Image (cartoon, grey):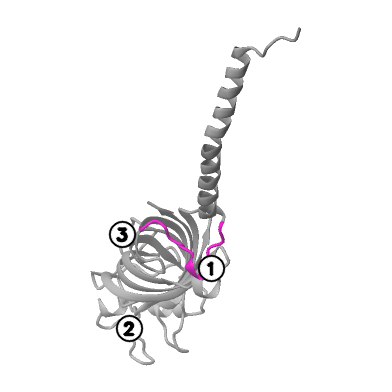
Amino acid sequence: MRSLPSPTRSLAGVVLMALILGLAPLASFAQDTAATAAPADSVQVPANARTRHPSVLAVSASFVHLLPLHILKENVVDINDLTAAGTGVTADFRVYVLDGLALSFGGTRGGFGLRDNKPGEMAAINERFGDSAPITPDNYLRLDGAFLNITAYLGNKITPGSRFNPYLRGSFLYYDWALHEDGRGSDVVTYQDQAIEGQDFGVGAGLGTEYRLNSRANLDLQLLWGYLLTGDEIKWEGLQSSFNDSYYWTNTHFWNLSLGLVIGI
């Protein structure tokens, strides 16, 4: 005689079927949710809509190589024409007004050495110094200052699919400078008991590029031309060229080549 189905087994089968039917909508909902969320990370955003600077604020620090520009005419003897390449550091605080436009406020510390590599030029200057300490290759032109940069980023226009983000930059400069006898911190060179030092404004213009390391960090490479009105601060009676009456201490021109790191905060 065949046995009847066990009530327990029938009840277990009904419960299992109910669970399967009940969980199916939940599984389908989970798949739909995952499918909806996935494009946020994987979808290809149009290049011209990329956000290069997700952080509104950032800080930056750079190592600087300073290259003096000697643009004086022939037969003009000038202390500025004897400067040699130097180094420095800068740091700034940045505000991204727009993703492609930033204002940065910062400071710089650096300077130039001097060199006696032009026959007779340093000697001709020292003839006018009399009892004052002479100009020598040991002298150091200290250039410490502050700056305001305006930077326009062009990456979404000219390199949309690249980690590089080229830019153009304009600068307003203010420098506290002095010609020291033997390096930073030594006595300031004087002429007729007046120190060769001052505080002056200047301007700068240049270009550069960022290179994206991750969403918050970028390398920053810059080449900027700087022009300081150092010659307008102090003019010494008698310290002038015999060729065209130009002063032996004039405005200062230089290239600023820097490499730094920018961190969004």
The residue to which callout 3 is attached is: 187
SS type, badge 1: helix
Whether the residues at callouts 3 and 1 have beta carbons within 8 Å, the answer is no
Number of numbered discs visible in the structure rendering: 3
Whether the residues at callouts 1 and 2 have beta carbons within 8 Å, the answer is no
The amino acid at mark 3 is: Asp
- Report the front residue among 33 and 67: 33
Front position among marks 3 and 1: 1
Residue visible at 39% across and 92% down? Answer: 243
In this view, 74 is above or below 256: below
Residue 49 painted magenta: yes
| N-terminal-most mark, 2 or 3 | 3
The image position of residue 255, as x and y in percent, is: 46, 73
Residue visible at 46% across and 77% down? Answer: 69
C-alpha distance separating marks 1 and 2? 54 Å
Q: Quadrant of residue 190?
A: bottom left
Residue 143 makes an appearance in the image: yes
In this view, 147 is above or below 57: below
SS type, badge 3: loop
Q: In screen coordinates, is 261 left or right of 251? A: right
Residue 71 painted magenta: no
In this view, 45 is above or below 36: below
- Report the front residue among 208 and 181: 208
The amino acid at mark 2 is: Tyr
The residue to which callout 2 is attached is: 247
In magenta, the rendered stretch is 43-56
The residue to which callout 1 is attached is: 47
